Image (cartoon, rainbow, N blue to C red):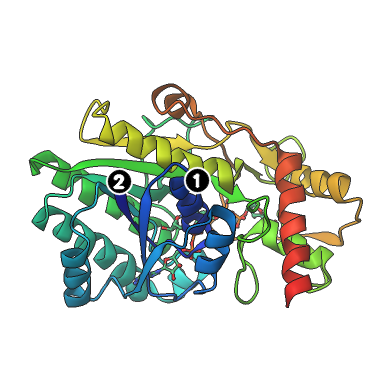
Amino acid sequence: MKQKIIITGGTGYIGSHTTVEFITKGFNVVIVDNLSNSDISVLDRIKEITGTKPEFEQIDLTDNEKTKSFFERHKDVSGVINFAALKAVGESVQKPILYYQNNINILLNVLENMETHGISNLIFSSSATVYGLPETLPITENAQTKRPTSPYGNTKKVAEEIIEDLSKVSESLNAISLRYFNPIGAHNSLKIGEAPSGIPNNLMPFITQTAAGVRDELKVFGNDYDTPDGTAVRDYLHVVDLAKAHVLALDRLLHKRSKSNFEVYNLGTGIGYSVLDVIQSFEKTTGLKLNYSFDQRREGDVPQLYSNPLKANKELQWKATLSLDDMTLSSWEWEQNLRKNN
Ligand code: NAD
Ligand code: WQD
């Protein structure tokens, strides 16, 4: 019999790519999402890729009663992959209550219902932002977590602390927190990808929208950092590589290979690229010239952040395979496809 899992936030950017990977590996997936930052059409797109349309329920996971009755209907699952969250860093600074209420209540409701129904296995979407300003690079999971610069980031740090607290007393909980670095790119079918609403906050969609003529110019935030070319350095990874890590992480839990009932893993390539490296790769792979200029540093940005992904390489048998050129081209192909269809 096929194993069934719950994917919260499964119609979103990373959730939809992960759903594809789980279905491909033979899992039955039930997605729960309130569609606050995603579209119902993603379900048909997933079907076009995999041949299977995942089960779906539109529920706000901060709603205690509705979440309870959702879990009553789906208690026969082997695990929960929890993506659902709000993720706009700038908005979280303006609306901290919304971010704490949404992201923390989702987690509390999910954990409470997992406990009620004896569902053990949880994979949680965390972020490299929990490292704050890193003291050493590349950063390992042993590095001290610090207060992130935004309320959004802090919801990830607090969420990890909540899971860790529960893991100390819960008989059944088995959790893995995955700390993503900077996911970019889209599925090679070009049927799913990221479609940010409004002005993008993140570098890659801003680059592709500028090249597509939707934005006039990319502002490179800071060229006076203590980095090889003065621009900030990040660890970009392809979203399909990232999605695959979730299947391997759940497999570790299902086969009881964890060393403790709360583990954390960095998910990145381990290579730091500067903003100018990303622009150069984009120009090379697409043959386009990008309109950009240098601007002030963006508040809250760290100069450099890139992972040591060896723990995930060894223990999850996971490794990012796609290069920066693969990623920038993938992002551009997705952007063009979006424009063609709109
Ligand atoms: P996304 O916004 O595309 O997906 C999140 C999904 O959660 C959306 O479909 C949204 O509708 C849903 N959601 C939000 N609040 C909800 C609620 N109250 N009830 C039900 N559904 C709700 O974001 P993403 O980029 O796919 O990110 C997925 C996860 O990974 C998030 O937890 C995010 O914080 C984390 N993360 C993302 C990145 C990144 O760069 N994209 C980096 C690190 C961590
Ligand atoms: C990358 C680099 C910018 C836009 C954020 C969140 C993190 C995680 C991923 C999750 C930085 C520079 C950007 C632009 C620029 N989030 N930049 N011009 O800040 O590393 O991480 O997204 O949900 O929690 O903090 O990613 O893509 O915003 O920026 O120069 O218009 O590109 O300064 O150096 P970041 P990013």
Q: Position of residue 219 (x, y in %)?
A: 75, 62
Residue drawn at 76 percent across, 72 percent down: 339
The kind of secondary structure element at disc 1 is: helix
Q: Name the residue nearer the viewer: 255 or 274.
A: 255
User: 241 or 212: nearer the eye?
Assistant: 241
Q: Which residue: 48% across, 25% down? A: 313
Tell whether 71 sits left or right of 190. Answer: left
The residue type indicated by label 2 comes to: Gln
- Vertical position of residue 323 compared to residue 96: above or below: above
Determine whether 18 is above or below 109 in the image. above
Some atom of ligand 1 lies within 8 Å of the CB belonging to the residue at label 2? no
Determine whether label 1 and label 2 are within 8 Å by CB: no
Mark 2 sits on what residue? 3
Q: Quadrant of the C terminus?
A: bottom right
Q: Could you say where residue 94 lies in the image, as x and y percent from the top left?
A: 45, 75
* Mark earlier in primary sequence (1, 2): 2
Quickly name the residue at label 1: 243
Q: Is residue 69 above or below residue 314?
A: below
What's the distance in space between the residues labelled 1 and 2, CA to CA? Answer: 18 Å
Q: Is residue 132 visible in this depiction of the protein?
A: no
Question: Residue at horizontal 71%, vertical 54%?
Answer: 331
Give the amino acid type for the residue marked by disc 1 in the picture: Ala
